Each structure stands twice: as C-alpha cells, then as structure tokens.
Amino acid sequence: SFNAHYMAAPALLSVRDNELNSKEEKKRKNASLTARIAVAFLAVSIIPIIMIAVMVASFIIQQTLNARFAKYSKILGPSGMTGAEVARKMLSDHGIRDVDIVSISGTLTDHYNPQTKKVNLSEAVYGQRSIAAAAVAAHECGHVIQHAEGYAPLRLRTALVPVVSFASKWV
C-alpha cells in the first residue's frame, strides 16, 4: 500500500504542477489581455484629447498671428519698400536669381514652393509697405535661402507637405 502511494506521488505531483502551470499561464494571459485593453482604452481616450488640444492651440496661434499682422500692417516700414521689393532685395543680396516672386489671392496665404521655385506672397504682403509685409516677405525668403543651402529640416518639411495636404483634405 505504501509502495502504491509512493509510486502514485510523482504522477500526482506532475498533475498538480500542470494545474499550477496552467493557472499561472491563465493569470499571465489575463494580465496581458488586461494590459492590452488598458492601453487601447488610453489610446482611444487620449487621442481625442490631444487632437482637441492641438486644434485649440492652432486656433489661438492663428488668431494671434492675424491680430499681430493687422496691428503691424498699419505701421510703415522705414525703407518704404513693398513686401515684393523686400523679397527681391533679400534674394538678390544672397545671389539667388532663379526664384520668382508672385502675388496670390488670400490673406496670410504666403509660402515658398521649392518645386516651382516661387515665393507666393498674398496681396496684403506683396504690395504693402508695412513692417508686417516686410516681415512676412523676409520670412518666406528665409525658406528660399534654406533651400539654396540644402538645409535638412526644410527638406523634411518639403517632403511632408504632400502628405499633410492629402491628410488635410480628409480631416
């Protein structure tokens, strides 16, 4: 009788070990599932909060920019040059002669397009002689100079423009 129990003990221990291992494995799987659910919940709840925060910040920045542009559009620049003239001079001073400066419609729609090599200045910048017009024109010409010098962050920005443009049509 002792021998029978003695012989059965390893088998019982083996079954018990398997039960423990199985329970531990279930606990690990449940913990892993719980962690994945928690991460998914956080992602779902945090992403809208981040998006709203970015939209609010963008709105505040845009309003501040519009207010400052309006304020400084009333102050004439000391040189008396228009935004277009400031842009031409700045590019000329840097030896850049293959970039066009054109007037486009809109307000604060100014941008430099490296593919077409055009500085697009809004009507409010192109023909005005204000400090604001000079600052915006100089800012856009700064991108031209960065492009001419092969500035790496500008290359990254240029590469991202089509992606952002595409995404903004769907958002």
Image (cartoon, rainbow, N blue to C red):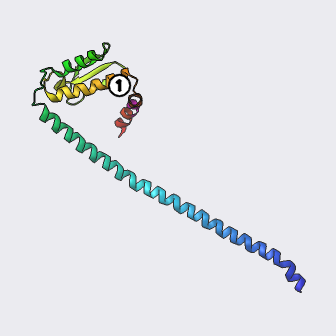
**What secondary structure is the stretch in magenta mostly built from?**
helix
Q: Quadrant of the C terminus?
A: top left
Residue for badge 1: 146
Structural crowding at the residue carrying mark 1, measured as other residues with C-alpha within 10 Å and reported as few (<14), some (14–19) or many (≥20): some
Residue visible at 35% across and 50% down?
Answer: 50
* Residue 29 percent location from the top left of the image: 60, 63
Picture quarter containing residue 92?
top left
Q: Position of residue 49 (x, y in %)?
A: 35, 53
Quarter location, residue 123: top left
Q: Which structural element holds mark 1?
A: helix
Q: Is residue 138 left or right of residue 1?
A: left
Q: Which residue occupies 40% across, 23% down?
A: 150
Question: Taking 80 as reference, is 25 left or right?
Answer: right
Magenta-drawn stretch contains 162: yes
Q: Quadrant of the N terminus?
A: bottom right
The region drawn magenta spans 159-163
Answer above or below: position of 129 versus 18: above
Hey, which residue is sitting farthest top in the picture? Answer: 97
Q: In the image shown, does 3 or 126 lie closer to the viewer?
A: 126
Q: Residue at x 19, y 18 (%)?
A: 85
Q: Amino acid at mark 1?
A: Gln
Q: Position of residue 145 (x, y in %)?
A: 33, 22
Residue beneath the point at 32% across and 26% down: 143
Does the magenta-highlighted stretch encompass residue 100?
no
Residue 66, position as x, y percentages in the image: 18, 37
**Which residue of the protein is positioned furthest toward the bottom in this rendering?**
1
The image shows a total of numbered marks equal to 1
Say above or below: 33 vs 123.
below
